[in-house]
Image (spheres, coloured by chain):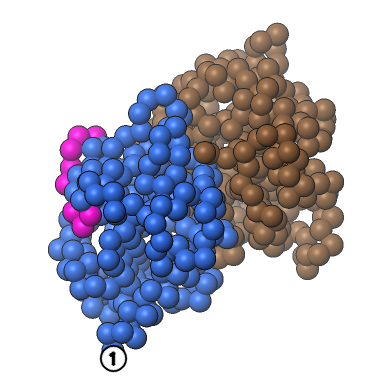
Amino acid sequence: MIGIVDYGRGNLRSVEKALEKVGYQAKIMNEPQELSEIDGLILPGVGAFADAMGALKIMGWIEPLTQFAHSGRPFLGICLGMQLLFEIGEEHGEHAGLGLLAGRVIKFPPGGKVPHMGWNSLNLVQSSRLLEGIPNQSDFYFVHSYYADPSESRDIIATSDYGIVFPAVVGRENVWGAQFHPEKSSPWGLKLLTNFGKLVNDNVALSSN
Amino acid sequence: MLSKRIIPCLDVHDGRVVKGTNFVQLRDAGDPVELAALYDKEGADELIFLDITASSDKRETMVDVVRRTAEQVFIPFTIGGGLRTIEDIRRMLRAGADKIALNTSAVQMPRLIQEGAHAFGSQCIVVAIDARSTAPGKWEVYIHGGRTATGRDVLEWAAEAEALGAGEILLTSMDRDGTKIGYELELTKAVSRAVSLPVIASGGVGTLEHLVEGLTLGEADAVLAASIFHYKEYSIEEAKRYLAERGILVRKTW
């Protein structure tokens, strides 16, 4: 079972329906206690960094999410949910993130239209099971004004180009982030969610052995 | 790099698509959800549903359309028409819409843009502007589906909408709407330059070359079309191939 964190920010229904479409059961979770029944986790998110962290904090998610990540079970952050994986966000001042990946979330330099909204292509920089079967230059749907700047380049799995080159997919061990919306990026976004579902199932099989 | 977008628009009345019944491959060509799923499959980059239902008591029908669309369509979609309050917006977003479009209500209550952007983020607040030419280089904002003049200048209104927190402008030329002679390029270019938001060109498309013009001469970020797709004059794929051949970056879905 894949859990989707509901903290009042983001289009949870679309993520849930997209997972169902590719054959995985998903559960929208309102309580951190529900994490114990969950084999894989998706942290969605739309809106501002500090506001989202504030909501997670008030609802008691911060520690349980960190523990979940350390448990080795697959964890995927989407859009703002990816940005929250990092240490610091610079949206409306400096704010602490979950710190599961090292780096900061910074604003696009002035010049281009912000938000970066629409379909953009991925440049795959290293292989990852999350992107298995997804060709280089496949298009995904982005909506964001800030982007992650990982401290360690080995955490960058794919980049995209919007005047500057920025990380579109990041990950280390069992924690991944996608800056775009896979649930809105038919057909390749659905492929990514399929891959995530497989990672979750494989991890369950591994753990029960 | 960021692709230019092709956005089919569906007019929905009482839960049924009112234009475009030439899709023989559909079981029910009047079902907006089935048509939306087909456009998704054909490679549309986004969809816009305009609810032209007159009575507000039928609003629940549209919420149901949104809900069912979200179960089957995995590209972004926008809902416009008759949304007048934050609660109206919330309901559509909760049902699964990615963005909402405000037109008359935004002109009458500009605060709605601000409150909507604050509550849900600028990225989901599209301001739709119906423009009519009044003099060379001058356009006036119309509301109530184009029936009421407001005396407001289109370029000023677009800039104000941006300042209030709109994330995108859907710009329709009323002079060109339904004519099939092409987008009003001067208008589109003027608005594209007046704001730093993405602009969707609408009104007047009749050929694939018109799409090219809107994205190049009109400087639009996206092009909206209704009848050329609904009546199967062109498929989305044909349109995208045509744009790609002319050097415009599109999302390849073939």
Q: Quadrant of the N terminus of chain A?
A: bottom left
Q: Secondary structure at mark 1?
A: loop
Horizontal side of B75 relative to A169 (left or right) equals: right
Subunit that carries the residue with mark 1: A
Between A181 and A153, the one lying in front of the other is A153
Chain (brown) = B
Is B115 included in the stretch rendered in magenta?
Answer: no
Q: Identify the residue under disc 1.
A: A209
- Residue A68 position within the rendered picture, expressed as x and y whole percent measured from the top left: 22, 70
Between A23 and B24, the one lying in front of the other is A23
Q: Chain A, which colour?
A: blue
- Residue B135 position within the rendered picture, expressed as x and y whole percent measured from the top left: 70, 8
Q: Quadrant of residue B148?
A: top right
Q: Most prominent secondary structure in the magenta stretch?
A: loop
Q: Is residue A83 above or below residue B144?
A: below
Q: Residue at x 77, y 47 (%)?
A: B238
